[in-house]
Amino acid sequence: MKRVVITGAGTINALGHDVATTLDAMRAGRCGIGQLELRDVERLSIQIGGQVKNFAAEGHFNRQQMTLYDRFTQFTLMAAREAITQSGLEFSGELAARAGVVLGTAGGGVSTWDDNYRAVYEEGKNRVHPFVVPKLMNNAAVSHVSMAYNLKGPSFTVSTACASSNHAMAQAFQMVRAGAAPVMVSGGSESMLCFGGVKAWEGLRVMSRDACRPFSANRNGMVQGEGAGVFVFEEYEHARARGADILAEVSGFAMSSDASDIVMPSKQGAARAMAGALQDAGVNLDQVGYINAHGTGTAANDKTECAAVADVFGHHADKLMISSTKSMHGHLIGATGAVELLACIMAVRDGVIAPTIGYQEFDPECALDVVPNEAREADVDVALSNAFAFGGLNAVLALRRV
Amino acid sequence: MDVKTKVIEIIAEQAVLEPSDVTMDSTLESLGIDSLGLVESIFAIEEAFDISVPFNANAPEESDFDISSVASIVAGIEKLVAEQK
C-alpha cells in the first residue's frame, strides 16, 4: 500500500477566501458568523449564518462561465485553484489520464433550484434558462474542476449530508493508497444560504438564532455556513520525487453506519468510526493529540460525540484536545469536513490547535478539553477529523505529521 | 372544533392512536412520540391554528413552551392562539 500525503490546500469560507486567512482567523478565534444577507431574509426566523462575504464571482469568472456556475461550483473552483497552484502540479499525459477528482456536496446547486422555482412558481414564468440542469446537478463542481485542470481519471460526487466531504476524501485517499491514481483532488463544497436552503433547515428546529456554541451547556443549536475546501492528495514517493511541500500525511480513515435513526446520532456508530480510523492508520490511542469534532452545537450531537470519544479513548480522552471550529465558520453541511481538515493540518503541521469559540458554560456531559475560546500551542502527531451525518453515516479521517 | 380536541387529534395521529387513548396527563414519551415526532406535531399544530410555536429542539426547557404533558401543550397552544389571533 502507498502512503498518501497532502501537497495542496485551498478554501473559501466565512473566515477567509484562502487558507492563510482562514487559519489566521482560527488561530485568533475570530467568528465568521453574522447577519445573513439574502433575498427575503425578513421572512426567515433564523437570520444568522457563516456567509461568504465580499466575494464577487464576476472578478474570477467570465460571463459564459458565470451562466454555468452555481455558487457551490464557484466556491469549488476558487478552492481548487488555490490547492492545485500550491501543489505545483500540472496535469498532462499519463498523470492527467490517471488523476481524478472526488468531491462532496449535500445539496449541489441549491440556489439554482431556489431561483428557478421562484421564477416558475412565484413569478409564473413558463420558461427557464437552458443551463438550469447542468448548473444545479450535484456533480457540476467535480466536472468543472476536471475540465479546468485536465483531470481525466476517476471522478465523481459523494453525497452523504454532513459527512459528504469526509466520505469523498476517504474515497480519494483509498484510490491513491491502492495505487489506482498517483494524485486525486478531493474535498467538498456547499452553498445553501439562500431563502429555500435556510427555510428547510428552520423546519427541523435545531438552529440557533444567536450563535453556535459547541459543548457549552447553554448551546442552543447549529448555525449554517457555506464555502468549499479542496485538497491535493498525492502518493508520497511521487510527491517526494518532485520535491513537493508536504502539508500532512493522510494516514487512515473509517466509515460506519448507525443503522438506527434518520436524525438522532448514535454513540456506537461514532465510536466505531473513530476506532476504525485509528486501526486503519495503525496508530495507538495515546498518539492522538487533537480531534476536530463534528461539534454542531446541538444538544444531541455534542453530548453523544463526547461520550463516543470517552468510550474509544478511555483515560486518554482527558488528555487529548477536541474542538469544534463550526463555532467560527458555521456548519458547511457537505463541505464541512473539508474546511475542518484545515484545522487538523494546522494542528499537526504548525502545532496550533484551533479553539471552540463562544464557549460559556461547562456541561458535565461534554467534560473533555474542548479548547475553549483561545487557540493553543501543542505538539500533535496525529489528528482525527470527525463527520457524522444525518442518516447515521459517519466518516473519520486520520492525519499525521510528516 | 376547540383547541383541546384538535391538539389531541394531531397528537393521536402522530402516535398512531385513537384520540380517546390520549389523555390530558399523557406524556409524549408515554405515547411513543420521539423528538422527530414532536417537531412534526408542532408543525401540524402551527398549520392547523395558523400560529407560530416558539420551540427549539435543542433547548426544550428554554423554549417558553412546556411539552411535559398533553395538558401543558394544550394550555400553551390556547395561550398562543389567544395571543396571535
Image: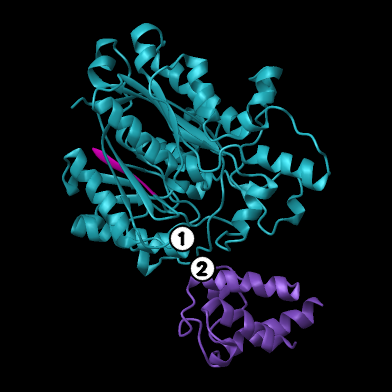
Chain colours: A cyan, B purple
Magenta range is: A380-387
Element marked by disc 2: helix
Q: Residue at x 55, y 89 (%)?
A: B22
Q: Position of residue A395 (x, y in %)?
A: 34, 45
Mark 1 vs mark 2, CA separation in Å = 8 Å
The residue wearing badge 2 is B36
What number is the disc on residue A205? none
| Quadrant showing the C terminus of chain A | top left
Q: Position of residue A78 (x, y in %)?
A: 55, 25
Element marked by disc 1: loop
Residue kind at label 2, given as amino acid type: Leu
The residue wearing badge 1 is A263
Snapshot quadrant of residue A253: top left
Indicate whether residue A384 is drawn in magenta: yes
Residue kind at label 1, given as amino acid type: Val
Q: Is residue A374 above or below residue A249?
A: below
Q: Is residue B54 visible?
A: no
- Which of these two is toward me, A159 or A128? A128
